[in-house]
Amino acid sequence: MNSWPKVYLPPLEGIEYPSLKLVDSNKGLVELDNGSNFAIYVCGITPYDATHLGHAATYLAFDLINRYKILSGSTVNFVENITDIDDPLLERAKRDNQGWQDLASKQIDLFSSDMSALRVLPPDSFIKVTDSLALIEDFISRLDKAGYLYKLDSDYYFSVGKFLDQMRMPIEQAIEIFAERGGDPKRAGKQHQLDPVIWIGNRDGEPGWASSYGFGRPGWHVECTAIACNYLDKSGSNPIIDLQGGGSDLAFPHHFMSAQIVKAAYGRDFAKYFVHAAMIGLAGEKMSKSKGNLVFVSKLLTQQVDPMVIRWALLSGHYQQDRQWSDNLLAVANDQVTAIRSALARSEVAQSEQLIKDLASDISNNLDTPAALARLIKWAKQSESNPTVNQSGLVSRTIDALLGLAL
């Protein structure tokens, strides 16, 4: 399907880009090579509710990676899915007496509008699960032929037992988290409590599709793996993609299971790097649909909040640090954006060459946006007290390209 409109990425000349360093959830600090091809897969939304600030913070983080890799010379292939058939979507549609396709369509449109307002670069491929059922079935058949699929009643499960030595937590903790995040460890008849469902046989009243595994719908983990491998496995490389990204709540079980499913299907590793963004909280609690404490991007926009202020506020905290949203954070961001705009409106500003080098260095250092924004604030103050050069346009283009801040 079509993603949101392209976002202009201003060309920057004469800037040296240090190699991008990121904290991988498994390996710690890693350094990515500049140039060459770069394949990234980011898990998209389940479209049953509007984009909240936790979503926005995650997609901003991977937008920064996308921008930096493009600017530093890589050919990036960025794929993002939409999980437009899943239990939460069906439950919300039933609760609201609404068709699930209508609900999904409206929320996808709203998400796209929010991402466009926040100046997130659109993915090269924006893929709905319901448009991918044939390729998902083909992927499932790989698991079947490799001997990793088994049937339980009308459902099919992936046998993960051979891969559990790759798990980085105690089995008891994994089972608890698995149950909290959509798994069914207590189901009788499973070969292992952590085996994830791959194909869900049809239940009364639910949508389903015909397949060689019966009438039903795919499970969560296999959807992402099938889509990612179909759109990004172009060279037979090992690993198949460079980077798998998403929120920290996806690290287990979703990204762990995705990696093992690909290993079983292809005999190759899925991703070279696994990078996760932290959670956004409100009043001391994680922001989540279950708690009902969400702050929505679309609601802020309807309240006439400048989307660049929202982006600035989210970038003011480090993407891998759990942090809190508040009205005060938004007010401070508004004041700081106003100060930067005031500086950029000057005919002469403070010397900017070192600022630009430092901004690139900050982003290369595991997306250190708090340091980058602090530099901009300092530069704005210097531009008031000691303006000497006509470089406001250069600074404007730089922060637009590197940070996505069109000020």
Image: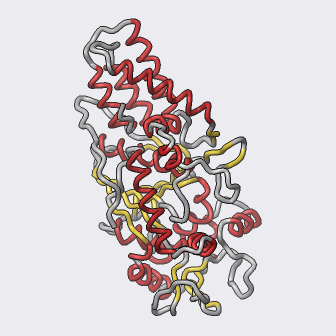
Side of 209 where 232 appears, left or right: left
Q: Is residue 274 above or below residue 134?
A: above
Display colour scheme: secondary structure
The residue at 72%/42% (across/down) is: 284
Classify the position of the N terminus by image quarter. bottom left
The residue at 50%/61% (across/down) is: 45
Side of 20 where 276 appears, left or right: right
Tell how many labels.
Answer: 0
Side of 41 where 90 appears, left or right: right
Is residue 366 in sight in this rendering?
no
Tell me residue 176's x, y (percent). Answer: 74, 66
Based on the displayed image, in which of its 4 quarters is residue 156 positioned? bottom right
Side of 33 where 91 appears, left or right: right
Tell me residue 202's x, y (percent). Answer: 57, 88
The residue at 75%/78% (across/down) is: 186
Q: Is residue 68 above or below residue 353?
A: below
Work out whether residue 154 or residue 72 is closer to the camera in this orientation and state it: 154
Work out whether residue 51 or residue 184 is closer to the camera in this orientation and state it: 51
Work out whether residue 257 or residue 378 is closer to the camera in this orientation and state it: 378
Is residue 143 in sight in this rendering?
yes
Classify the position of the C terminus by image quarter. top left
Tell me residue 398's x, y (percent). Answer: 32, 31
